[in-house]
Amino acid sequence: MQIILCDSAEEVGRRAADLVEARMRQGPAVLGLATGSSPASTYAELIRRHREEGLSFRDATAFTLDEYAGLPADHPQSYSSTIRREFVDSVDLPLARLHTPRGDAGDLVAEAVRYDAAIVDAGGVDVQLLGLGANGHIGFNEPTSSLRSRTRVKTLSSATRQANARFFEDDGEEVPKLCLTQGLGTIGESRQAVLVALGTTKASAVRAMVEGPVSAFCPGSVLQLHPKAVVVLDPEAAARLTLLEYYREAQALDDELS
Ligand code: F6R
């Protein structure tokens, strides 16, 4: 796991965007996209580079991580709508190559299997962007998710539904109870994972993910088994890490070499 310590949300966005751009410069890329507030500065930076520096997503393909069950794709709070509003509609990624799980599928179990297979058929994800739940989830893999799980239907925890109530007029009851999410095994197959975390509310989960044991109780800790996982943090999210000095030294050396 590589840890990148940043001074601000904007720097988190720049560092994460650097990793996405580096892969895109190598040729057509399959991107894994997260929704929620964590990647906002990353998307803002990628949109800026698209507009001002000619970074093109024309040849890219994208798969989102998860979706609320029961919401049609055009519901304003569906992750399908959200990713378009917050990123895809502002760049030149062809909509035909934006893939999202269908939360309103009649057979959600079959939809999960189809989605997982579609990722494999596309050649797998090159760069997977991730946020981290305050309870340690990645995607919507809640604590005790199987570390080798595939895309499937999951029950959202009440903590996650409360945390996301802000997108549903602060009414936790409006947040769907079920979701479709890429599994931890699915996410683990991405060729690079880039997790961004911001703010004090993530500090305990960051510590458990980076320095705790690999455990289904903190699903993000499965990234310790990933061959190329990068964790990009603002000062508040990094505040509870014990090896901060070591991460700083490693980062300085890495920056010097690149
Ligand atoms: C969203 C997702 C979730 C979020 C996590 C953090 O697609 O997969 O794991 O990344 O819930 O949410 P925010 O970023 O809103 O704090």
Image (spheres, rainbow, N blue to C red):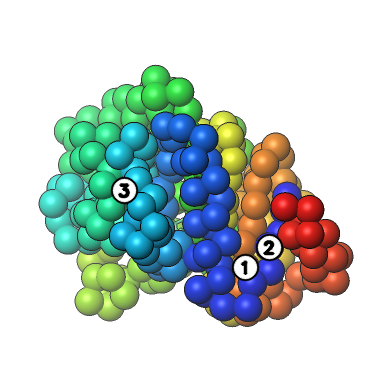
Report x, y in % for residue 45. 42, 64
Whichever of callouts 1 and 3 sits on the residue coming sooner in the sequence is 3
Report x, y in % for residue 156. 40, 55
Q: Which residue is mark 3?
A: 67
Does the CB distance between marks 1 and 2 fall below 8 Å?
A: yes
* Residue that appears at 23% across and 39% down: 94
Classify mark 1: helix, strand or loop: strand
* Residue that appears at 59% across and 41% down: 192
Tell us which disc is closer to us: 1 or 3: 1
User: At label 2, which amino acid type do we have?
Assistant: Ile
Q: Does ligand 1 reach within 8 Å of label 2's beta carbon?
A: no
Q: Which residue is mark 2?
A: 4
Tell us which disc is closer to us: 2 or 3: 2
Q: Nearer the viewer, residue 130 or 47?
A: 47
User: At label 3, which amino acid type do we have?
Assistant: Glu
Position of residue 170 relative to residue 212, above or below, is below
Q: Which mark is residue 233?
A: 1
Does the CB distance between marks 1 and 3 fall below 8 Å?
A: no
Q: Nearer the viewer, residue 12 or 163?
A: 12
Q: Dot 3, crowdedness within 10 Å: few (<14), some or many (≥20)?
A: many
Q: Looking at the rendering, which quadrant does residue 6 occupy?
A: bottom right
